[in-house]
Amino acid sequence: MVEKTFLGFPRKSGRPGTRNHLLVLGINGLVATGAARVAAALPGSRLVATPYGRGQFGADKKCHFRQLVGIGANANNGAVLIIGVDRSSADEVANGIAARSPVLVETVTLDDTHEDALALAELGIRAGSRLAREISRARRQPVSVSELYVGLECGHSDASSGLAANPLAGALADRLVDAGGTAVIGETIEWLGAEHALRHRGAKPEIGEAIVLAVAAREAAVTAAGVDLLGNNPGAENIRGGLSTIEEKSLGAVAKAGSRPISGLLPFAGPPDHAGLYLMDGPSFSPESMTGFVASGTQMILFTTGPGNSYCSLLAPTIKISANPTARERLESQIDFDASSVFQARETLDAAADRLFAEVIGIASGTLTWGEAVGEGAECFTRIGASL
Amino acid sequence: MSAAKEEAGWDAVQIARNDHVAIALRDLSGSVRVRRGDEVASVTLLGPIPLGHKFALADLPAGSEIYKYGAPIGQLTQPVATGAHVHVHNLVSQRARQSAAPKE
């Protein structure tokens, strides 16, 4: 039993939003405080302000730009107010967003106010309030589940994760992909030892090869720094929990990706071309990984945990799933979805996946997650190079 | 919302149909019920299996590639019988042995 529609905010093109944010986007560390000043004066707005944005070069600069543009272009934004320093880089980000998304964009910069930060705040508040009123005209309408793009993340895992929560997330991914939707998992280093299984799932041979190369490249980078990923993997704690090999540990993490063919390997923060299941080559630290998902376009994130993990995305509603019975009792409201029934053999994975799908539809349609209710949420830019 | 309300109906699960091992959902010993797809089968354990640990669902020769999650997780170093504990004492990584610095 899979729902066919959810109530979303249709956009002029591209995916509908599960939310209708006014995003205040600070694109340069020099105006991070200025962007915060503007957002504070616009109730309900969402603030993402990079501490960087200048003095970067090469692949790192490109990756940072891709994150800024992708965060702005996410379908959960009804409008984006760019706060910048110079006109030309603000326009560059605005044009990048416009190329990917029909979202309303306005820019205000220190160039416009001859470096006057308080005048910038006033300009920003005026522009932001116009945008807020404009996007408030939007109404939720039934949209196809095939328009949903979900990111799958795990953090703080235990025996219940590999046994229940991750396979459950995978069953959800299978259902979503079968319904024409899109899903992504990241955390490249967690594929270490599962490359053979992932390679065979590539929809084309070159996708499988690209996955293997991505793992090898990241492993080589880590090894070059003197870290042995295989020597202590699985660790003593993993072994006590029943994990015997690195393959087993990684397959437990990769279980979040379900069992459908892999349509492609995305670069960090890169958008998918089509519907289907994707892998994203990126860091394993959840704040960075999830921002990569958001910049790629996910309108929702499923986050599996064992003992609990409170981190949420700011822009994509984040559903916390735990199959650990004590965690659910301890963190009664913080765990959005209780999968302990699967772990305790009171419910089959299929039945729980149907329940989870219904929950995903509800949250996509406007039901608040724990993180949204308490204001837990952030976005975290990743850096892949030195500064000038 | 139609969560099953019946008492726990099985003690261990086979995650994918082609898996050679089942996973204990609690500390187990003796005769246990294993959920395999839509069925629940009975298996007699050869020793205690702690929560989260694996036991064999068939008699398997040394050198067998062992599947869990529908994919290989390593190779047996010795034969195991149905109901035997499968862990670091009889299962080795194939990935770690291929790496530049194999650890025996």
Image: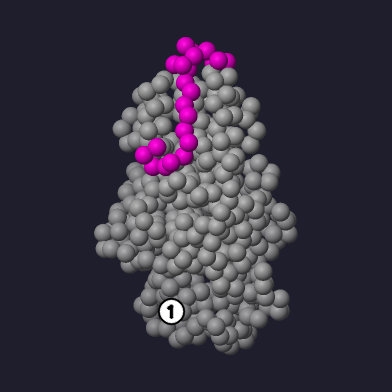
Quadrant housing the C terminus of chain A: top left
Reply yes or no: does residue B69 show up in magenta: no
Reply yes or no: does residue A111 show up in magenta: yes
Q: Which colour scheme is used?
A: one colour
Going 43% across and 41% down the picture, which residue do you hit? A102
Q: Position of residue A241 (x, y in %)?
A: 57, 64
Query: Compared with residue A203, is residue A128 higher up or lower down, i.e. above or below?
Result: above
On the image, which quarter does residue A361 sit in? bottom right
In the figure, is residue A204 to the left or right of B96? left
Q: Position of residue A7 (x, y in %)?
A: 57, 55
Query: Compared with residue A100, is residue A303 higher up or lower down, i.e. above or below?
Result: below
Going 38% across and 46% down the picture, which residue do you hit? A270
Marks counted in the figure total 1
Which of the pair A248/A117 is nearer the observer?
A: A117
Q: Is disc 1 surrounded by few (<14), some (14 to 19) or many (20+) residues within 10 Å?
A: some
In the figure, is residue A90 to the left or right of B28? left
Going 37% across and 62% down the picture, which residue do you hit? A262
Residue tagged 1: B18
Q: Where is residue A36 in the image (x, y as percent from the top left)?
A: 58, 27
Q: Mark 1 lies on which chain?
A: B
Quadrant housing the N terminus of chain A: bottom right
Going 33% across and 63% down the picture, which residue do you hit? A202
On the image, which quarter does residue A319 sit in? bottom right
Which of the pair A193/A20 is nearer the observer?
A: A20
Amino acid type assigned to the residue bearing label 1 in the image? Asn
Of all residues shown, which one is farthest toward the left?
A: A206
Determine the secondary structure under disc 1.
loop
**Residue A386 shows up from this direction:** no
**Residue A273 shows up from this direction:** yes
Which residues, given as a range, are shown in magenta? Answer: A98-119
Q: Where is residue A206 in the image (x, y as percent from the top left)?
A: 26, 59
